[in-house]
């Protein structure tokens, strides 16, 4: 067996300048577009003149992403950063592909990586031995793929289970209703309607706007379903004393030691993630106070790819503000925050409504008026507490199982890489 430089086993191929811009990708089409993204197919095109003209199969390398793809079907080259290689004489395409996936290339973020690949040498056994190595790798990977598929099914089932828990919770089917308990115990109770009147009074007391106080709009009756006994319909506007968004132009004041600045990208699905949060150097004046974030606030992304993502704010320990792309919902009664948030993130309820509005036509986005207009089912306060406790119990179990599944998925990926490394160690 010999060890040869990379450029002796992989012959660069020209795309003849035919590269499809990402903005021109189609979701469906007659010709697959292969780019340097992690997904094998980046999109499609119907323009056959953009097809790669070289001999197949070829191995593609993402200069910026380090992704490696074996392509043996007609395709168009997508965007920039793709290097195309044909196996040299005496080199099996799959052998080259698997070796490139095992290549020890340092991670330079979005920098260029081909410079490292071309400096490496490749162990090159006979074609028969190459085929044997590929066959053994694919046998091992077949087992791994089956295990990963099972783990992915578990994740999908957990997602469905979470959605069903939230749906049952905010529709009064997860715990006994306060009306049922009160009837059995022969006592009275505060209904959702009575609670709403208290909230409206609290809302008015907290209002600090200018001019005449404006009554919040009640929910429209169109399409609202029947509620359990003791519940009532309200709007987000009725339950909050302030719904606003951040100030424009604050992105011009980024600073390493400024105040915390929460942007749309910091709001993931149902959670706030501040690991990469920005900071801004702005004066804390009346405008700043208006969009400052405190514990119990609900944040909703209203523009961009993450529109309708939301988070319930826990204690931050410092002053924070939101960007103009985030709606800030300050509830009049903090005790309702957890239940209202569960309603918002329920895929069959609050989230479904906002998504239908945000993606109805044109560029995805929610207006503040749409945020205010969200209909919310309001149970008695005591019932809310029981619902939230039961939801937390279920979601805690889901999070534990998800963490174990994710850990096993990471182990599978590590095992895949170690299998590749061992295969070529002994090639």
Image (cartoon, grey):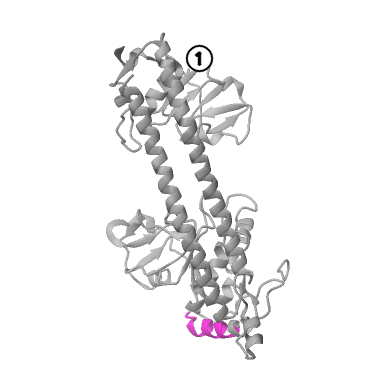
Q: Where is residue 390 drawn, in percent x and y?
A: 53, 70
Quarter of the image for residue 88 reads top left
Q: Is residue 380 magenta?
A: no
Query: Residue at left 42%, top 68%?
Result: 291
Measured as percent of width and height from the top left, residue 100 is found at 38, 24
Q: Residue at x 58, y 79 (%)?
A: 214
The picture places residue 270, in percent across and down from the top left corner, at 49, 60
The N terminus is located in which quarter?
A: top left
Q: Which residue is mark 1?
A: 54
Q: Main secondary structure of the magenta part?
A: helix
Q: Quadrant of residue 74?
A: top right
Res. 65 visible in picture:
no
Could you tell whether 320 is left or right of 54 in the image? left
Q: Nearer the viewer, residue 360 or 57?
A: 57
* 81 left or right, relative to 107: right
Per the rendered image, the range of residues in magenta is 197-208
């Amino acid at each position: 067996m010999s060890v040869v430089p990379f450029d002796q086993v992989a012959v660069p191929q020209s795309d003849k300048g035919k590269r499809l811009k990402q903005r021109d990708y189609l979701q469906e089409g007659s010709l697959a577009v292969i780019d340097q993204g992690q997904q094998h197919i980046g999109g499609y095109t119907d323009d056959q003149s953009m097809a790669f003209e070289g001999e197949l199969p070829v191995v593609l390398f993402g200069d910026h992403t380090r992704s490696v793809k074996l392509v043996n079907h007609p395709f168009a080259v997508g965007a920039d950063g793709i290097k195309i290689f044909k196996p040299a004489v005496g080199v099996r395409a799959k052998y080259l592909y698997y070796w490139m996936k095992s290549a020890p290339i340092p991670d330079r973020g979005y920098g260029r990586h081909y410079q490292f690949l071309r400096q490496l040498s490749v162990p090159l056994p006979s074609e028969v031995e190459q085929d044997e190595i590929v066959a053994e790798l694919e046998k091992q990977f077949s087992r791994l793929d089956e295990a990963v598929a099972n783990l992915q099914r578990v994740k999908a089932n957990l997602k469905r289970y979470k959605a069903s828990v939230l749906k049952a919770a905010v529709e009064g089917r997860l715990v006994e209703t306060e009306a049922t308990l009160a009837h059995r115990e022969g006592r009275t109770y505060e209904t959702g309607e009575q609670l709403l009147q208290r909230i409206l009074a609290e809302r008015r007391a907290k209002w600090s706007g200018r001019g005449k106080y404006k009554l919040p709009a009640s929910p429209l009756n169109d399409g609202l379903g029947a509620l359990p006994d003791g519940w009532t319909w309200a709007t987000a506007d009725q339950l909050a004393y302030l719904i606003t968004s951040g100030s424009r132009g604050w992105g011009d004041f980024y600073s390493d030691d400024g105040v915390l600045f929460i942007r749309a990208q910091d709001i993931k699905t149902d959670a706030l993630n501040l690991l990469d949060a920005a900071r801004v150097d702005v004066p804390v004046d009346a405008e700043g106070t208006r969009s400052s974030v405190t514990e119990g606030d609900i944040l909703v992304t209203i523009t961009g790819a993450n529109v309708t993502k939301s988070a319930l704010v826990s204690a931050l320990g410092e002053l924070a503000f939101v960007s103009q792309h985030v709606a800030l919902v300050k509830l009049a009664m903090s005790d309702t925050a957890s239940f209202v948030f569960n309603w918002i993130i329920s895929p069959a309820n609050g989230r479904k409504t906002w998504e239908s509005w945000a993606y109805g036509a044109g560029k995805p986005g929610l207006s503040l008026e749409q945020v205010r207009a969200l209909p919310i089912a309001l149970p008695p306060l005591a019932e809310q507490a029981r619902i939230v406790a039961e939801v937390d119990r279920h979601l805690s179990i889901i999070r534990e199982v998800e963490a174990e599944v994710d850990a096993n998925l990471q182990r599978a990926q590590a095992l895949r890489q170690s299998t590749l490394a061992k295969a070529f160690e002994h090639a």
